[in-house]
Image: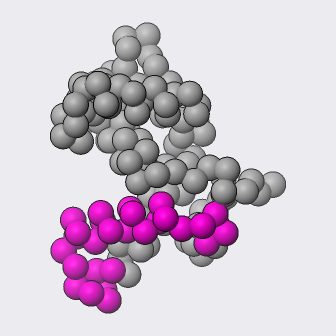
Amino acid sequence: METNFEHMRMSASEIAYMIAIDETAKNCKTGEAMGKSVAEKRNLSRASTSRALNKLCAKKLLMRTEKNGYVLTDRGREVIGVYESCIRRVKEELAIRFGCRDAVAYEDALRIVCALSGENLSKLAKSEGEKCF
């Protein structure tokens, strides 16, 4: 059963936070990301990072651990998987068509994917062979 993408569209900032959580947790022995580490990774204040992470917890995309760290929920992993696949595809197209540096192509791809309508996000995800939300 396919769910409407409009109900799960994310901002570029939200996706960047989720990617930072995922990467930080993967590089940590405990498998969780601490808010301080995420703030440092994103070069943002701990207060704004905490607010953003709490909002993602409220959306059930992240959850707090017993040690006050964060991990992606199953739903969060599913969402980030689809977005990362779409971002990767758009990044490749930007690099091929415009010869962009990887970092520039990635940041632009992140913003482009997050600006897509639910309809086009769904089509892009399907074209990449990813399951829908």
Indicate whether residue 112 is drawn in magenta: yes
Could one spot residue 19 in this view of the protein?
no
The single residue placed furthest to the right in the displayed view is: 1
The single residue placed furthest to the top in the displayed view is: 66
Q: Main secondary structure of the magenta part?
A: helix
Q: Nearer the viewer, residue 129 or 88?
A: 88
- Image quadrant in which you'd find residue 52: top left
Q: Nearer the viewer, residue 66 or 39?
A: 39
Residue 9 at x, y = what percent? Answer: 57, 53
Indicate whether residue 12 is drawn in magenta: no
The colour mode here is one colour
Residue 27 at x, y = what percent? Answer: 27, 35
- Image quadrant in which you'd find residue 29: top left
Horizontal side, residue 26 vs residue 113: left or right: left
* Residue depicted at x 35% and y 77%: 92
* 31 relative to 111, above or below: above
* Residue depicted at x 62% and y 49%: 8
* 116 relative to 76, above or below: below
Range drawn in magenta: 94-120
* 59 relative to 112, above or below: above
Q: Nearer the viewer, residue 118 or 72?
A: 118
Horizontal side, residue 124 vs residue 103: left or right: right
Residue 57 at x, y = what percent? Answer: 51, 28
Residue 34 at x, y = what percent? Answer: 30, 24
* 64 relative to 88, above or below: above
Horizontal side, residue 3 vs residue 124: left or right: right
